[in-house]
Image: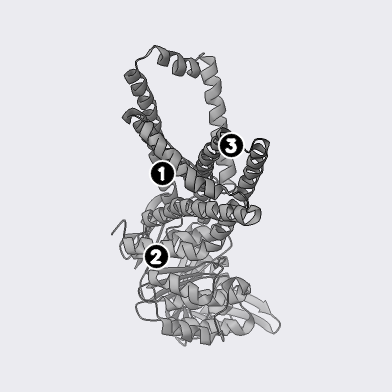
Amino acid sequence: MKKFEFSRYLLVCRKQFVEDWRRQVGFTAVMAILLFFIFWIVNWQINIMMSYDETNSAVSEGSVVFFSWYKIIMFVAVTVLAIAYQSAHSMPFMKTKTSQIAHIVLPATTLEKYFAAETFAFVFSVIEAVVAFFIADALQYALTGHFTLTEVSSTSLIDVLRNFGLTMDSDYSVIISLSVCVIVASLFFHSAWFTFCATLFRKHPFLFGMLILWGVNQVLSIFVSTVSFNFLSVIITPLENMTHTETMLYFKEILYGLIFGQLAVAIGFWIWSYFRMKKVEL
Amino acid sequence: MIEIKDFSYKYKKGKDMVFDHFNLELSAGHVYGLLGRNGVGKSTLIYTLMGLLQPRTGFVTIDGMNASERYAELLRDCFLVPEEFELPACTLEQYIKYTSPFYPNFSQTDMERNLRLFNMEGNPNLKALSMGQKKKVFMCFALACNTKYLIMDEPSNGLDIPSKEQFRQLVKTGMRPDRTIIISTHQVGDVESLIEEVVILEKNRLLLQQPVKRICEVLRFGVNDENPLYKQEFAGGYFTVTKNETGEMSPMRLELLFNAVLLNDDIAKLF
């Protein structure tokens, strides 16, 4: 008995896509509209800022750099949100008895069905986030016309990155790369956590998942304040007394900790979710 | 062959065991009628066969494979038509296109023939169909998959009167020597002519498991017969169940048999 057969996995993916594509389109549209309004407000603010001092190139450049990074941060935030939401809804078959029956009796192994659900949640969320981002950008260009963030980001952001890269020493570039890894690990963590929530809660898995994360965050905050552990003093003060190499090592350690910590927890939740799905009963 | 050995099951929220060390064997190539009162465990048994429920003790095997493991190789040989089910929001052709590859013996010719039997044409959107029409489409598909095991829970529920006869035709057409069909129902009249072997469950035990032929050899189903083992009143007198002492076979009345076996323990002992 094969635990995993690629052709069957593709069949499950296809089935899931045909049954769910309408919801995916709707989700992308909602994301695009949300992003459009954010861009629109930002655009409006940038115009106000620039109208004060059109001749001041420092203000313009500053705005350009800020909003270029701002867009990247927005994109990452939207992608994390999309992955979290999609993962929380990656197992619609867990919701009702009839959908559970249809899912369990489908001739594929639990592993194939699980991977299909995860593929859908993870890959499609990233694709949908990209599509929504470009739709939102195109929409705000079409409606506002005279100033587009697309132009700003496509021209200035590359320059900013290139200049930044030239001035960086290798340590900083490692830290930047590691920071990107932290973001990717965060995507994995959110995907795994909300997938687990999908197996745990039949109703409102996204909402409950968020509430639990918020609750855990609050508990950790209380714990940190109780033990009088001041992150700020640890992060800032020692750096002043450290040599450059020590500071870099210190940062790298923190980033490695964040990456591997998130990945370890993510893998744990994924395995747990799989076994919950495998053992699920009506 | 389906083998249920030492099977126990209790729902998490339930107080009592639905099954407690229960045993049953169903050989291939027959149409079984699974009968029993409400709550006796017919659906539980069916769901366990399909791996939807996990036995607390014992095991359920189909062709030697443990049903609770949900092997893809086993599931592609089994099809469940539950009492309530969902169909996706797509057209019939799309549904066939992406679901049929899971079933290697699916036949498009059979599907078309089955749909014709139910007078269904075109390529309807499945979400737009009525419950009865959905059931017809689903049963057509179930039979066209040509799985070795076909399990149906209350298949005639939701079908109108002409469709019930079409349903019987459908099952007869889809019957093959190597195919096992299990029909669990309360609408005994709808499936009477289909059933080859009767399985009656009573609380936590198997009350009767006999082929229809054998039942008719042992029992006589008549009207106003003397010394009945069981009688049921109707406008013109009594339907009766008596011992068949003449050897002459009478057509079996499933509802009568069911009530007789439930109310008179001695009847099951005759077999």
Question: Which mark, by number, is residue A211?
Answer: 3
Secondary structure at numbered mark 1: helix
Tell me whether marks 3 and 2 sit on the same chain.
Answer: yes
Q: Earlier in the sequence, mark 3 or mark 2?
A: 2
Q: Is residue A248 visible?
A: yes
Q: Residue B55, percent across and down?
A: 42, 52
Q: Secondary structure at mark 3?
A: helix
Type of amino acid under label 1: Trp
Residue farthest front in this picture: A55
In this view, the residue farthest toward the top is A241
Out of B256 and A160, give the one closest to the viewer.
Answer: A160
Residue A27 position within the rendered picture, expressed as x and y whole percent measured from the top left: 57, 55
**What residue is disc 1 on?**
A270
In the image, what residue type sits under mark 3? Leu
Residue A200 vs B110, above or below: the answer is above
Q: Residue at x 44, y 62 (%)?
A: A105
Residue B245, which numbered label? none
At x 41% / y 41%, what residue is drawn? A184
Q: Is residue A46 left or right of residue A267?
A: right
Q: Which comes sooner in the sequence, label 3 or label 1?
A: 3
- Does residue A96 sit above or below A180 in this rendering? below
Q: Which residue is mark 2?
A: A11
Side of B3 where A231 appears, left or right: right
Q: Is residue A263 left or right of residue A151?
A: left
Q: Residue furthest right?
A: B235
In this rendering, the answer to whether A19 lies above or below A242 is below
